[in-house]
Image (cartoon, rainbow, N blue to C red):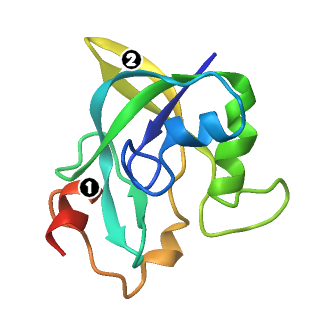
Amino acid sequence: MKYVFVYGTLRAGEINDINLAADRHAIARPRHLGRATVAGRLFDFGSYPGMVAAPAHAQSSVVGDVYEIDDALLPVLDEIEQVYPGLDGLFVSSEVDVEMRGDRVACLYYPVAPAAIAGRPEIAGGDWVAYRRTR
């Protein structure tokens, strides 16, 4: 089992809902561990957001959810985020430490390449779901 931090369309109820992605591929549903924030900034790419990481002491943070996932779900998430070995894309697969109930959990997540945010509007508050509902 691995852990993943999702902040955009992979969140529950969104167009790439991680639970429904697991269902479509007959993979065990992820176990939701809770809501969390990660130091970073969130940007509007139209129908989805993109996050760039920031130092842990940064003032800005991104809201998301942490799930424990079956290893078989990793290639599905990579496909959704169009992350392919050896190819540069918009999203990258990376790791971030997330605090959950007083413990640090190493999570996979999908930030965007920093150069990709040029000219994109920043999402104040860092919460894609709340932002999308008000557009």
Visible residue check, residue 127? no
- The answer to whether residue 115 is left or right of residue 134 is right
86 sits left or right of 19 in the view: right
User: How far, Cα to Cα, is label 1 from label 2?
Assistant: 24 Å
- Mark 1 lies on a secondary structure that is helix
Quadrant into which the N terminus falls: top right
* Badge 1 or badge 2: first in the primary sequence: 2
Q: Residue at x 72, y 37 (%)?
A: 25
Q: Which residue is mark 2?
A: 104
Q: Tag 1: Cα neighbours inside 10 Å, few (<14), some, or many (≥20)? A: some
Residue 51 in view of the camera? yes
11 vs 127: above or below: above
Measuring from the top left, give residue 10's x and y in whole percent: 47, 48
Name the side, left or right, on which 10 lies relative to 1: left
The C terminus appears in which quarter of the rendering? bottom left
**In the image, what residue type sits under mark 2?**
Arg
At 41% from the left edge and 59% from the top edge, which residue is drawn? 51
Looking at this view, name the residue that lies furthest to the bottom: 119
Residue of label 1 = 129
Residue 78 higher or lower than 15, as above or below = above
Q: Residues within 10 Å of mark 2 (few under 14, many from 20)?
A: few
Say which element carries label 2.
strand
**Residue 21 vertical position relative to residue 27 in the rendered view, above or below:** below
**134 is higher (above) or lower (below) than 107:** below
Picture residue at 62% right of the left edge, 57% below the top: 81
Compare residues 26 and 85 and report the one nearer the observer: 26
Residue 9 appears left or right of 39: right
Residue 75 drawn at (x, y percent): 75, 41
- Give the residue drawn at x 32%, y 22%: 99
Of residue 12 and residue 56, the one placed in the foreground of this image is 12
Question: Residue 52: which disc?
Answer: none
Provide residue 71's location: percent of width, then percent of height.
71, 24
